Amino acid sequence: MNYGKYQKTFSLSVPVERAWQAFTDAKDLEAWLTGTVEETDVRPGGRIAWAADDYGQLVWDIVEADPPNKLVYKEGPGILPVETDVTVTFEETESGTRITVTQAGFGEGEDWGSHLDSVGLGWVQTLAALDLYLRTGVRYDRFFTFQSGLGMMTEDWLAGPVVVSVDDGAFAAKAGIQPGDIILKLGSAPVFGRTDLWLLTREHPVGKEIEVVYARGSEVLTARAALTDPT
């Protein structure tokens, strides 16, 4: 598996100029990425910057801007631990616009698989907000809604999310979870993938005690611990 980059191609039912605007206009960006955009200078050397929030300050440093065909920017460390390079291309089609997003610059090796999985799922869920907004005009944040965290990085396997790393003092560590464990159940719901983990942390606040069931080798283990901070 190539852990160096994430790529997704999708279509929007709007003209290419409108799709470009959605990625570069402050009000449009606030509609599907939320937060407050403080600066929009869409030219090489310029940047798009959001006000700092619980996840830090998001900044896109513009490398290339060829409206309405191509946007290239660098996204600094924050949500991710490293700087990444993002390329967005816009192609006119009979029904609207075909867009390809490529995010590169991740480390190599299995330890980076969980970061790449998170980026992919994050793009899918934020792009859902973009499509909803462009189709209906509705602004509704469904992504930045985490109330708590589990304190572990996971990678989706067919068997379920396997733990890659555990943060000291967080929920997973308190529940005795270790790298290599496979999460089977959280609360009363079975777990099949990372989306199930995210759903629980969006529903329950910090301090809520949750039961977790996980597999370690041929054993099935059960524990309880309090949910911790999402950051």
Image: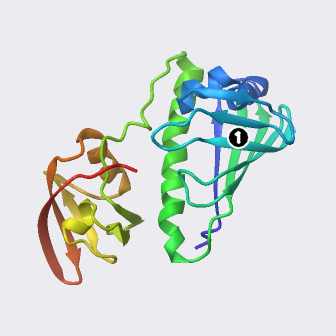
Q: Quadrant of the N terminus?
A: bottom right
- Give the image location of residue 179, x and y in percent: 34, 76
Tell me the residue at 55%/33% (across/down). 33
Query: Would you identify the image quadrant in which residue 193 lies?
Result: bottom left
From this view, report whether residue 61 is shown above or below residue 16: below
Say left or right for 91 vs 228. Answer: right
For the point 68% across and 47% down, the residue is: 101
Asked if one can make out residue 95 in the rendered structure from this viewpoint, the answer is no
Judging by the rendered image, the residue that carries numbered circle 1 is: 99
In this view, the residue farthest toward the bottom is: 218
Q: Nearer the viewer, residue 166 or 64?
A: 166
What amino acid is labelled 1 in the image?
Ile
Q: Say which residue appears at 53% left-offset and 69% top-offset.
A: 112
How crowded is the residue under tag 1: few (<14 C-alpha within 10 Å), some, or many (20+)?
Answer: many
- Residue 177, x across and y down, in percent: 24, 71
Q: Is residue 60 left or right of residue 121?
A: right
Q: Is residue 208 above or below residue 20?
A: below
Coloring basis for residues: rainbow
Relative image position of residue 94 (x, y in whole percent)? 76, 29
Q: Nearer the viewer, residue 97 or 185?
A: 185
For label 1, the SS is strand
Q: Position of residue 89 (x, y in %)?
A: 77, 43
Residue 179 at least partly seen: yes
